Image: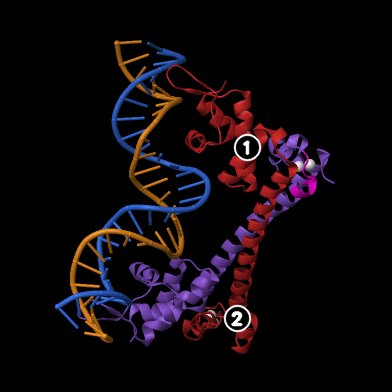
Chain colours: A purple, B red, C blue, D orange
Amino acid sequence: MLKISELSAKTGLTAHTLRFYEKHGLIQASTRSESGYRYYNAADIRRVEFVKTARSIGFSLEDINQLLSIRVDKLSHSCQEVTEITRNKLDEVNGKINELQSMQQTLQILLDSCCGGPERAIHCSIMEALDKDLFRNQDNESALQASGRVK
Amino acid sequence: MLKISELSAKTGLTAHTLRFYEKHGLIQASTRSESGYRYYNAADIRRVEFVKTARSIGFSLEDINQLLSIRVDKLSHSCQEVTEITRNKLDEVNGKINELQSMQQTLQILLDSCCGGPERAIHCSIMEALDKDLFRNQDNESALQASGRVK
DNA sequence: GTTGACCTTAGACCTAGCTCTAAGGTTACA
DNA sequence: TGTAACCTTAGAGCTAGGTCTAAGGTCAAC
Ligand SMILES: [Zn+2]
Ligand SMILES: [Zn+2]
Ligand SMILES: [Zn+2]
Ligand SMILES: [Zn+2]
């Protein structure tokens, strides 16, 4: 049976975070001392480590709550339910990657178009691009090329 | 000279957002009526559109504040300063993409390892993987393969 | 028997970028 | 003159996941 600071040391999660997870229904100390101290048994600790692992993969606390309901009663749940949570998360991640890659491309095009030197910014092609609103449509690259600024 | 709701219609930003940007020093209505109504002239509008464009690329409001200081006095600033802001943003975006791609790979491996069917979740390899803490190191794929669950 | 390290709770604070509400003043039109 | 649609401000609320503080109780060691 570990006290909260011992569990904190074992898992790398702070005592604050452990209490926060408890407040959100993710974990629990199955025993409390008379004075109210939390004591975590082996099963409690495995559950905390499950949460930590799921969290490190990127699952939200809400996702993890669902995964935990499955975990405590695997007979009543199917692989399908587990993959659905996982696939939703993957879709979400892929969506974010797409957004970020679009930003990445635009930023790279901007960087390629600017000399980056110590010259005054009066004719800076990045500033021009931001001013000309070249990003109203998806065709950023050709718009920038049309502006004559891509090297 | 546009009133705030007209500028809102023109830019697609809400009046709330325009006031919010003003509070954060990004934009301004250079004229106010006697009763306090904001009136935006052509230069004000161009500035708002600059902000909108920069925002759509993913620059933070703080980034945009810096870009705007350059914009109003291009003689005192260099292309180098502009590319630095842009490169920092690109680095940040690349960092986030890397994190997300790592999540993506892990989620994909999990999905590949699970049958996804209506069978009970007792032997679900995703649940097992989360329970076995296979993600303590970076070598997720080989760890999962070692667990004998990758198809 | 007192120090110091631990534990408890409720609840405030943080980021970032909005989003909305309340309470009231202004303007345009019929 | 009324009323609807606008405008103003300050400030609260939202998301997600913590992070921290305050005020107080507990426990082990010296
Ligand atoms: Zn240059
Ligand atoms: Zn430049
Ligand atoms: Zn299965
Ligand atoms: Zn499965």
Percent x, y for residue A34? 20, 80
Q: Is residue B22 above or below residue B140?
A: above
Count of all numbered marks drawn on residues in the image: 2
Residue A73 is at least partly visible in this image? no
The CB of the residue at mark 1 lies under 8 Å from ligand 2: no
Residue receiving disc 2: B113
Residue type indicated by callout 1: Leu
Q: Is residue B93 above or below residue B130?
A: above
Residue type indicated by callout 2: Ser
Residue receiving disc 1: B68
Earlier in the chain: of badge 1 and badge 2, it is 1
Percent x, y for residue B110? 58, 77
Which image quadrant shows ligand 1? top right
Instruction: Give the residues drawn in magenta, as a range.
Output: A111-119
The chain holding disc 1 is B
For image coordinates 57% across by 62% down, the residue present is A92
Q: Is residue A122 left or right of residue A52?
A: right
Q: Is residue A149 left or right of residue B139?
A: right
**Mark 1 and mark 2 residues within 8 Å of each other at the beta carbon:** no
Near-viewer residue (B83 or B8) = B83
Co-location on one chain, circles 1 and 2: yes
- For label 2, the SS is helix
Crowd class of label 1 (few under 14; some 14 to 19; many from 20; radius 10 Å): some
For image coordinates 76% across by 37% down, the residue present is A120
Q: Quadrant of residue A94?
A: bottom right
